[in-house]
Amino acid sequence: MAGRPTKRTPEIEDRLRHAFSIGATISEACFYADIGEATYYE
């Protein structure tokens, strides 16, 4: 049984790193990377 494809891509990881490097909160970084906070915590 296959699961859903991952949303974890190099582009999303780069966006998260960039957001955190400028002091974004987790919520703000997720918004910038266009992912939900639940996805971030997974």
Image: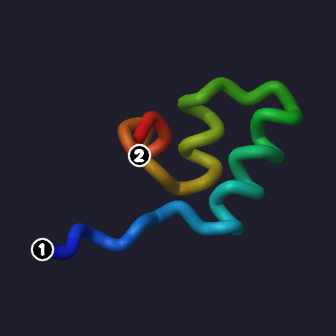
- Residue 3 appears at what percent x and percent y? 23, 68
Q: Which residue is mark 2?
A: 39
- Residue 13, by quadrant, is bottom right
SS under mark 2: helix
Q: Residue at x 42, y 66 (%)?
A: 6
Q: Is residue 1 left or right of residue 7?
A: left
Q: For the residue carrying disc 2, how many other residues have a C-alpha within 10 Å: few (<14), some (14-19), or many (20+)?
A: few
Image vertical order of residue 33 relative to residue 19, above or below: below
Residue in the picture at 64% in, 39% down: 29
Q: Quadrant of the N terminus?
A: bottom left
Residue type at tag 2: Thr
Residue 2 occupies quadrant: bottom left
Residue 34, percent across and down? 53, 56
Expressed as whole percent of the image width and height from the top left, the position of residue 16 reads 70, 46
In-image side of 13 versus 41 (left or right):
right
> Between tags 1 and 2, which lies in front?
1
Image quadrant holding the C terminus, namely: top left
Q: Tag 1, which secondary structure?
A: loop
Q: Label 1 is placed on what type of residue? A: Met
Q: Which mark is residue 1?
A: 1
Q: Residues within 10 Å of mark 1 (few under 14, many from 20)?
A: few
Q: Residue 5: percent from the left, percent from the top? A: 35, 73
Left or right for 36, reference 25: left
Residue in view at x 81 percent, y 25 percent: 23
Q: Residue at x 27, y 69 (%)?
A: 4
Q: Looking at the image, is 25 positioned above or below residue 17?
A: above
Placement of 5 over or under 20, stated as above or below: below
Of residues 9 and 2, the one nearer the viewer is 2
Residue 26 is marked as: none
Q: Earlier in the sequence, mark 1 or mark 2?
A: 1
Label 1 to label 2, Cα distance in Å? 21 Å
Is residue 17 rendered to the left or right of residue 37?
A: right
